[in-house]
Amino acid sequence: MTLRSRLFFVASLALGVVLGLLVSTGLQRAVSPTGPAGSPAGETQPAADPATAAAQRPVAASAGLDAEESHTIALFKGASPSVAFITTQAERMDVWTRNVFEVPAGSGSGFVWDELGHVVTNFHVVQDSSSQKVTLGDVEYEAKTVGVARDQDLAVLLIQAPRDQLAPIKLGTSAGLQVGQKVYAIGNPFGLDFTLTTGIVSALGRTIQSVSNVAIFDVIQTDAAINPGNSGGPLLDSGGRLIGVNTAIYSPSGASAGIGFAVPVDTVARIVPELIAHGRVVRPIMGVGFDDQLSAAVTRRLGVDGVLVRQVYDGSPAAAAGLHGTSVDRRGRVIPGDVVQEIDGKPVRSVSDLLGRLGGYKPGDSVTLTVWRDGAAKKLAVKLRAPE
């Protein structure tokens, strides 16, 4: 490289550096021509006084509570003393020492039913537990099980608490509920006691399966957030009255997905007095035998819906009403008996349905069965009785 070439290269490099600096400075001024609060760029601002900075954010005046908020707060304050937090324990045995001890089994919610100390919850809350504890306010009480109704997923506990500490919940009815009306759920989701969630009745007349695989009819569907631990807690209407007992959710994750279910209070009001009086539900019987598999096969072959009567017991209400059971002829062919399709006009599609429908009656009640016999529908009156 000649001397002239070297000088030309150095001069070009220096010119490039100068132009780069000029462009960089121009861009900085174009983007930020002034410093903070409009001061010239680079000028140092005095430090702000902490007391002055704090005084620059005054608290805005409260607009107060609107009517709906005031109503919800009043409802919660009125109903929460009736809501209970329930914990359960289960017995376990040490495999080495053979000693038996209790461990926490689960938790749920409940509510005070009367001034005698009866507390209502779900059966599945206390299922397989050896002991239970009920907390009202800040006081914990030992509880004992008075009775359970597996088919309706209900249980009644009893605590020894002073009467002035017992606030029985206000009783409502589920007969006149409307889709769209507001509801309120109070419970202890995930052990977080006295949690209130709100929503609406999103559907009525749902059917769910109980722990014993018997259908529970006329279940209330709500979008009020119901999570594990809410089970057994009250679902209230806008008057603070009990309209259902929160019992289940529909959720792939196990947490609230906006679909919860509650056993209707009209069912609760029928079952709880029986549990208190007898420790169990006295289920009425017709005196017939069923077989799920046989019923499904025969009704499918006949192309009808309902439950096939496999057997009618001698001296039973069903025998007195003239129901026909299934028989087998000399050639081994099955002669179908009556197929029960309705009870008092309400459809029956499975043994679970039939048992659930009968659960709504008491011994001594009369029901009208619609049965399929020889290709035609026939109505028969059956007077139910208590099991012997």
Image (cartoon, grey):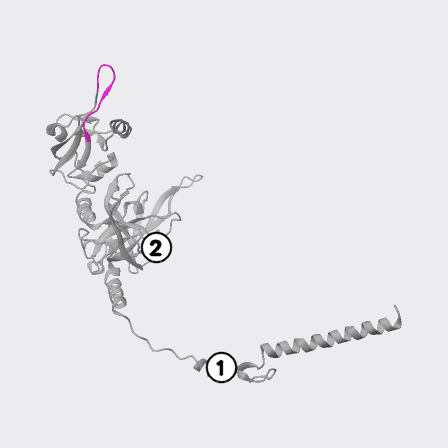
The residue that mark 1 highlights is 50
Location of the N terminus by quadrant is: bottom right
Q: Position of residue 205 (x, y in %)?
A: 23, 47
**Residue 289, image x, y percentages:** 21, 29
Three-letter amino acid code of the residue under disc 1: Pro
- Label drawn at residue 126: none
Residue that appears at 78% across and 73% down: 12
Tell me the SS state at disc 2. Answer: helix
> Dot 1, how many residues are within 10 Å of its Cα: few (below 14), some (14-19), or many (20+)?
few
- Badge 2 is on which residue? 189
The residue closer to the viewer here, 218 or 26, is 26
Magenta stretch contains residue 151: no
Stretch in magenta? 328-339
Residue 47 lies, with reference to residue 275, above or below; the image says below
**Quadrant of res 10:** bottom right
Residue beneath the point at 74% across and 74% down: 16
Q: Mark 2: give few (<14), some (14-19) or many (20+) Cα within 10 Å.
A: many
x and y, in percent, of residue 182 in the image: 25, 58
Residue located at (27% from left, 65% from top): 73
Element carrying mark 1: helix
Amino acid type of the residue tagged 2 in the rendering? Pro
